[in-house]
Image (tube, helix red, strand yellow):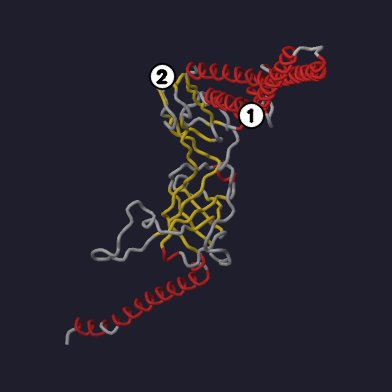
Amino acid sequence: MSSDNIASQEATPNKPNKRNKVLAIVGSAFATAGIAGAAYYFMVGQYHEVTENASVSGNVVAINAQTTGTVEAIFAEENQEVVAGQELVKLSPTDAQVALSQATAQLAEATRQVQQAFNNTGVTAAQVNQATTAVNTAADAVKRRAPLVVTGAVSKEEFANAKDALARAQSALQVAQAQNRSAKAQVSGTDVSHHPSVERAKAAFRAAFINEKRLAVIAPMSGIVSKRYAQVGQTVAPNVPLMNLVAANEVWVDANFKETQLKNLRIGQPVTLKADAYGKVTYSGKIQGIAMSTGSAASILPAQNATGNWIKIVQRVPVRIALTNPNELKAAPLRFGLSMTVEVDTHNRDGQLLGAGELSLGNLSTNVYAQDEQEAEDAAMKIISDNQ
């Protein structure tokens, strides 16, 4: 036997040993990774739900014209920050001012007519008193002549004339009393300021006054102009969009979790968020609400799984995340539509499953239009006062 064959025979038993060592190392590595993965899941992973199917949302208000007019000036441009009550667009005032002048004249006229009606009650009351005096005088004349007719001191013709005068006086009294009742009925239970005729003219004046004020299109809330449609010289009508206004100070994140991830989600659980736009920058938040329907069920054309062949698809449910630290938003502002990564800490599972958490009502109401109503009321009362 040659020396090469002897060397080959001596090397052969070593190969299985090396292979076994490699397999043992690989097996140990997989086992360690499996144990580490299992440990991580039971200690950390099972208490966290993560999704990248999330984006920034918020309140977007379409600024519309509230009256018909021609755009005369624009005071806000795209990406400009505005405050509640700031004038954004001005419409031509010609037609509205003409209508306001007509309404002013009608209110003044109605006030004077009603004031005259109140004055008429005094006039008719005086006429009643005058007619009553005439009746008493005529009755006294008849009473004095009645015994004299028997003695012939007063002729029958004179006595008849006295009775006719009494009848005429009584008829005139009845007319005066009817006129007085009619005059009182016109103003009974009210005063000049609250008379139905004045109230009707006042309502028309208020409408014209507020319509004239609406020529100045104002911002109902503070925010940033995101899109401007209005152009100078453009004729607009009510509900025609002029621009969009975004409430930059109040944004939230809509995260779409798989239905298999909902088991441990609760309202109020803390959330950590990252925006693709800022990389490692994190935001603090909490679950504010969990939708009552999946995204597909709430779509305009929901799937009809009862027809045709059915393929099971894991559905997603929208979960609204409220951002809880305003300072983080100031340092790294979030814009609508930005992609987000959402991680929910589900350690505490005592929260509710349905309903909504604490809501921010900052942009759900506005009082910028209340001033117009008060100004209209004050202007109307001044016209009424000046014409009484």
Q: Is residue 273 above or below residue 29?
A: above
- At which x and y percent is residue 232? 42, 20
Residue positioned 50% across, 67% down in the render: 264
- At which x and y percent is residue 331? 56, 42
For the residues labelled 2 and 1, the Cα–Cα distance comes to 31 Å
Q: Is residue 78 above or below residue 29?
A: above
Residue position for label 1: 374
Q: Is residue 255 above or below residue 331?
A: below
Instruction: Tell me if mark 2 has few (under 14), some (14-19) or many (20+) residues whose alpha carbon lies within 10 angstroms of its own.
Output: few
Identify the element where label 2 is drawn.
loop
Residue positioned 69% across, 27% down in the render: 191
Choose between 122 and 297: the one closer to the eye: 122
Q: Amino acid at mark 1?
A: Gln
Q: Earlier in the sequence, mark 2 or mark 1?
A: 2
Total numbered circles: 2
* Residue at far front of view: 151
* Residue at far bottom of view: 1
Left or right of 27, for residue 57: right
Q: Is residue 47 above or below residue 326?
A: below
Identify the element where label 1 is drawn.
helix
Left or right of 360, for residue 164: right
Q: Quadrant of the C terminus?
A: top right
- At which x and y percent is residue 88? 51, 26
- At which x and y percent is residue 198? 61, 25
Q: Nearer the viewer, mark 2 or mark 1?
A: 1
Instruction: Tell me if mark 1 has few (under 14), some (14-19) or many (20+) residues whose alpha carbon lies within 10 angstroms of its own.
Output: few
Q: Amino acid at mark 2?
A: Gly
Residue position for label 2: 233
